[in-house]
Image (tube, rainbow, N blue to C red):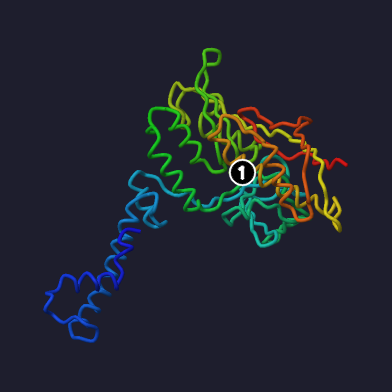
Amino acid sequence: MLFDDKTQNNIMIDLKEATDPDTNTEEGTLIDHSFRGAAAEFEQAYIELGMIDQNGYAETADREHLILRAKERGIEPFPASNAVWKAEFNIDVELNARFSAGELTYICAEKIEPRKYRLMCEQTGTKGNIKQEELAPIEYIDGFDNGELTELLKPARDDEETEAFRARYISIVSAAQAFGGNRAQYKAMMHEIEGVGACKIYRVTQKEKKIKIYFLDSTYKTPNNALVSDVQEIIDPIGKQGEGEGEATIFHVVDIYPCISEMVKIEAEITIDTGYVWEDLLPSIQERIDGYFLELAKGWENEEHITVRILKVNAAIASVEGIVDVQDTALNGKEENLLLDPNAIPVRGVIVCRP
């Protein structure tokens, strides 16, 4: 930080060096006591000046000042959102009926078809993305016997973390200005939509006179059909495409597509330490592989292709306690790195331990 060298002791030295040489400034003198009190105040002032300097730049500002700086450009952290689930009941229920499951509560927002509804989790954040046990009505419903959550239609997100917000803000201000239906504008549109985590924008081609947008949901997984339809409706509604009825620029025809999930089968010669068995180690290995694949999915938006690297897969497996060595790893049957389609993310398939 700026002014790190302006400590009380250093300031004392500076004050004494600036004093008339004939003046007695030894420890214990009146002027020494005066300088000591002043130096302490100066040190505090320099600390505060350093913080002002630090908070004046997006790269070093704390959350409070980063938000204030970003607001000058109309950019704010994404707030936590509500998960939306598809639910099924044994009977039809009223809209706005409320249900509980575990520590969460849900409100009936829309009827999809008989006995099937959209339920919105009333608590914000990713805890709403976890499937709960059987639903119970908060108020008595005549004839109600059972209800369950069947499909996560729109995943929720937590409040945007400071470093993620910082990176997004810097990316926006350093990139081309979002204007007039350019790539930056469509990217900004997509990231404002609840449930969207990442996207890729493809320009109009001679063959197809349409803009294509592929996206991942906010958990960096392939979005379901309901979310794809919702995003299409927001950007460029079917039946009114190109008319400027959505957020897309008028005359722009935009098609929304889900990013593809590509299953990755992993085969390897894995040496297991004494006292361990494969069946007990497999869940931990699956967890580490899922973590690596999630890391790749989070970077998909800024990569032309995702490459699943054998070295990284081996490292993930070897990080599990009880694994001694990993050799001759194959991804989808080939002992080489796996290059995915530009609009695909990896999903863990079968993991095979070869003898």
Residue 282 screen position, x and y as percent: 80, 49
- Residue under the point 32% across and 53% down: 56
Residue type highlighted by circle 1: Glu
- Residue under the point 78% across and 47% down: 325
- Secondary structure at badge 1 equals helix
* Count of residue discs: 1
- The part of the image, by quadrant, that contains residue 124 is bottom right
Looking at the image, the residue that sits furthest to the top is 206
Q: Is residue 307 visible?
A: yes
Residue 203 screen position, x and y as percent: 50, 22
Residue 59 screen position, x and y as percent: 40, 49
- The part of the image, by quadrant, that contains residue 338 is top right
In-front residue for pair 290/178: 290
Q: Which residue does the numbered mark 1 point to in the structure image?
A: 295
In-front residue for pair 308/152: 308
Above or below: residue 143 compared with residue 255: below
Quarter of the rendering occupied by the C terminus = top right
